[in-house]
Image (cartoon, rainbow, N blue to C red):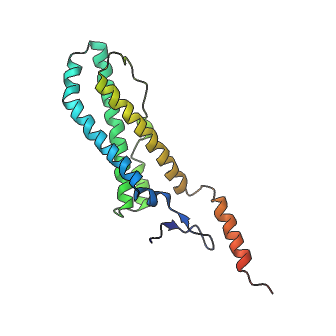
Amino acid sequence: MENHGSAKGAGEEKLVDFMARFTESEQFNRVFQEGMSLVEETADYLDGPGREEARRLPRPAALAYATESMRLTTRLMQMASWLLLQRAVSCGEISEEAAREEKSRISLADSAPEPLQNTDELPEGLRVLSTRSSRLYERIMKLDEMISNRCTPDADPNPVAVHMSRLAEVFSTPRS
């Protein structure tokens, strides 16, 4: 069995590396596939049926359509970049340090979903894609938060690991 732990310091137990385990899991594969499929599906929609539907919209709705399609595309590209970055780390293509540098270029927070304007006039296809991307965005943001909290050098040490380390020191110290 591979060791996915990361040493926290001398004498401390190795902790489970959440991201290493997660990116190797079926759950990550599903999130990854969902994200990539949604990018492809959105591109197909915006280049095909969406374009036709947008031409038939009244001017205010057409402006709302253009705005939402840009937001949707940006959000999906940021999420796809995040997913690809996590996969690259998992596959050993880049280090976690390089990933942290690259991650600073990904603006997940800046591409947060905003309430749709003129929703009654927007085509259903765009509304559905926007809703699906918003749900996926929320899941990715939770994952990103979990990863970031684990990777932050200034984060408080894991209290369980600290206690386990103390117990190990106490019980392994020879008595005179």
Note whether 35 is above or below 64 in the view shown.
below
Residue 20 occupies quadrant: bottom left
Quadrant containing the C terminus in the rendered view? bottom right
Note whether 119 is above or below 17 in the view shown.
above
- Taking the spot 34% from the left edge, 26% from the top edge, the residue there is 127
On screen, residue 138 versus residue 44, left or right, reads right
Q: Which residue is farthest bottom?
A: 176
Quadrant containing the N terminus in the rendered view? bottom left
Q: Position of residue 48 (x, y in %)?
A: 18, 29
Note whether 54 is above or below 17 in the view shown.
above
Q: Position of residue 6 (x, y in %)?
A: 52, 66
- In depth, the one of 29 and 118 nearer the eye is 29
- Taking the spot 44% from the left edge, 71% from the top edge, the residue there is 2
- Taking the spot 41% from the left edge, 51% from the top edge, the residue there is 27
Q: Which residue is farthest right?
A: 176
Residue 174 occupies quadrant: bottom right
- In depth, the one of 124 and 148 nearer the eye is 124
- Taking the spot 43% from the left edge, 60% from the top edge, the residue there is 96
